[in-house]
Image (cartoon, rainbow, N blue to C red):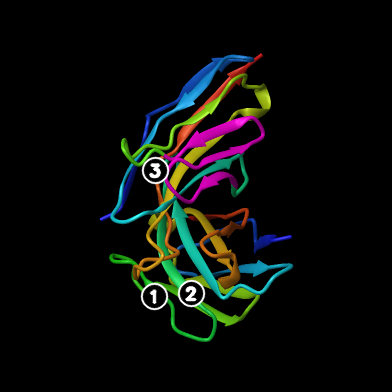
Amino acid sequence: GAVVSQHPSWVICKSGTSVKIECRSLDFQATTMFWYRQFPKQSLMLMATSNEGSKATYEQGVEKDKFLINHASLTLSTLTVTSAHPEDSSFYICSARKREWNNEQFFGPGTRLTVL
Amino acid sequence: GNSVTQMEGPVTLSEEAFLTINCTYTATGYPSLFWYVQYPGEGLQLLLKATKADDKGSNKGFEATYRKETTSFHLEKGSVQVSDSAVYFCALNPNAGGTSYGKLTFGQGTILTVHP
């Protein structure tokens, strides 16, 4: 159990367009989902924490109007990169956590975003 | 604040060699400690974890012991295989009583390449 999927696995878009990335917990209900950004050969940086039914909590320095997060159900969270620019190109990874599982997070496979 | 420092890579080994990847941390209270592995093109997978001092996490031949006196959680494997080639991340999850509970802090990652 504890499978997390992301869609799409990769996306290429033009500068100025918006891109939506989905994160789904396939076999459990996730009370909390996290969104990370990973630059090439670097560590993961937490962008925001998303709790079902409430607004996301963004980390310092992350533009909430740029990176829109919606956690509408216990199995789905979405990250929308609005008006994407080349500097937004990165690997975006989500993780999901279930309250009863204490502090363990399960990670999705990631989405590679390339903005031309 | 919390931080995790890993030994810099890349690490290149021959098959059946002994592996050590150092990890030290800074945190208040009693964090949980994790090692994650990321294979090429994939998301992170939990490799092992330890939730309190002197705990030893182990999985797939890998081990790490939570050393509070040295604030370390070094990853070891006695005999590496080509299939172990991946990026390894050390991470901590802070004290459950804190407001940052559930947020993982990652080290910068260590690239391991194992040659036949």
How packed mark 2 is, by other alpha carbons closer than 10 Å (few <14, some 14-19, many 20 or more), is many
Q: Are marks 1 and 2 in contact (CB under 8 Å)?
A: yes
The chain ID associated with circle 3 is: B
The chain ID associated with circle 2 is: A
- Looking at the image, which is closer to me, B36 or B108? B36
Residue that label 1 marks:
A57
| Residue A1 at x, y percent in the picture | 74, 60
The chain ID associated with circle 1 is: A
Residue that label 2 marks:
A50
Q: Is residue B65 magenta?
A: yes
| Range of residues picked out in magenta | B46-66
- Looking at the image, which is closer to me, B78 or A75? B78
Amino acid residing under circle 3: Gly
> Residue at the spot x=67%, y=68% of the render?
A25
How packed mark 1 is, by other alpha carbons closer than 10 Å (few <14, some 14-19, many 20 or more), is some
Amino acid residing under circle 1: Thr
> Residue at the spot x=48%, y=64% of the render?
A35
Q: Is residue B65 above or below residue A73?
A: above
